Image (tube, helix red, strand yellow):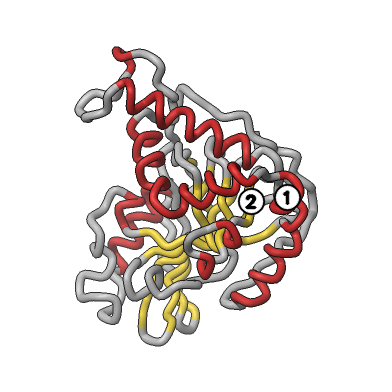
Amino acid sequence: MNKRKLMIVSLLTSFVWSLPILHTPYHVSVNTAYAANTEDRDFNTDKEAAKKWGEEKYKDWEEKKLTKAEKDIVYNYTASGASVLNDYLIATKGNLVEKQEDLPPGTDYKLADAQKYNEKIKNLEGILKKVSTPETVSVYKRVSETQFGMEAGDLRPNGPRGGMDVAKAQQIQDDFLGKTFEPFKFMSTSLSKDPDKSFTGERYGVLLHIKVPKGTTAAYISDLSKYSDQVELLIQRGYTYKYDKFTIINEDGIQSLKVDVSIVPQ
């Protein structure tokens, strides 16, 4: 395979890569009624427009399709349940464990824990299955270099304002171009870029820019969330994603690795 050299345009360095295909024994049934030839809506940094769109498009789902108990489930997920449930799903590779012998090795999980988590996961799945994206929309997610098997901070060894290690970025491109991954967990994303100061290029060196097709099982949950300022679109677990393009972006002296990602139709 021929290596593609990094292409520098103004303040941008463009390149493409992807992650090794992960084979998972468990898949959630997801809605893949994608619309062809649909322009994607991208709010970029316009948080207010993103918030308005989310509230308008998901008002019926929130007000008419969810019970008080289901709204509480979403709130509790955002308040304290997300990391617990998603860590469990990653450990089990998406399986909802029902037997002691199927518990993931090297962990402290007990069967009683698994049964409790399974119920909460199924409840959240059911809530998300009641709605889908009304049009194709782009969302954002900040992550660290661990997404690609590196240590956090490896791409910017001199700090967020110390520039990008282009050689390491090139290696990511060479290793991951066009491949797919399934995160196993529910995917938390934002309708606008860096809506909260806790998740910005200052802290995380990688920005995922994900194109979510019309008909994807996902819900705007900010009005139900403990963290309403994150304009969150929560995507159902079970989707497979593909890395399409990488770009080094420079924003106010802070360089990040922007990764264009798409959802693979099933």
Query: Where's residue 137, x and y in %?
Result: 67, 59
Viewer-side label of 2, 1: 1
- Which residue is disc 2 drawn over? 219
Q: Foreground residue, 47 or 173? A: 47
Residues at circles 2 and 1 in contact by the CB criterion of under 8 Å: yes
Q: Residue 231 carries which label?
A: none
Residue, far bottom: 252
Q: Is 234 placed left or right of 40 in the picture?
A: left
Q: Foreground residue, 121 or 207? A: 121
| Local SS, label 1 | helix
Q: Residue drawn at (57%, 61%), measured in percent from left and top?
A: 222
Q: Residue drawn at (79%, 48%), measured in percent from left and top?
A: 36
Query: Where's residue 74, x and y in %?
Result: 54, 48
- Which residue is disc 1 drawn over? 61
Q: Is residue 53 above or below residue 132?
A: below
Mark-to-mark CA distance, 2 and 1: 9 Å
Which is nearer the N-term, disc 2 or disc 1?
Answer: 1
Amino acid tagged 1? Trp
Q: In this view, does 101 lie above or below 195?
A: above
Q: Is 206 placed left or right of 244 in the picture?
A: left
Q: Where on the picture, by quarter, is residue 216? A: top right
Q: Foreground residue, 115 or 89? A: 115
Q: Is residue 46 above or below residue 187?
A: below
Q: Residue drawn at (58%, 50%), measured in percent from left and top?
A: 262
Q: Is residue 238 above or below residue 251?
A: above
Q: Quadrant of the N terminus?
A: top left
Q: Where on the picture, by quarter, is residue 202? A: bottom left
Q: Residue drawn at (33%, 28%), measured in percent from left and top?
A: 113
Q: In which quarter of the image is the C terminus?
A: top right
Query: Where's residue 208, x and y in %?
Result: 48, 60
Amino acid tagged 2? Ala
Q: Could you tell me if residue 229 is visible in this image? A: yes
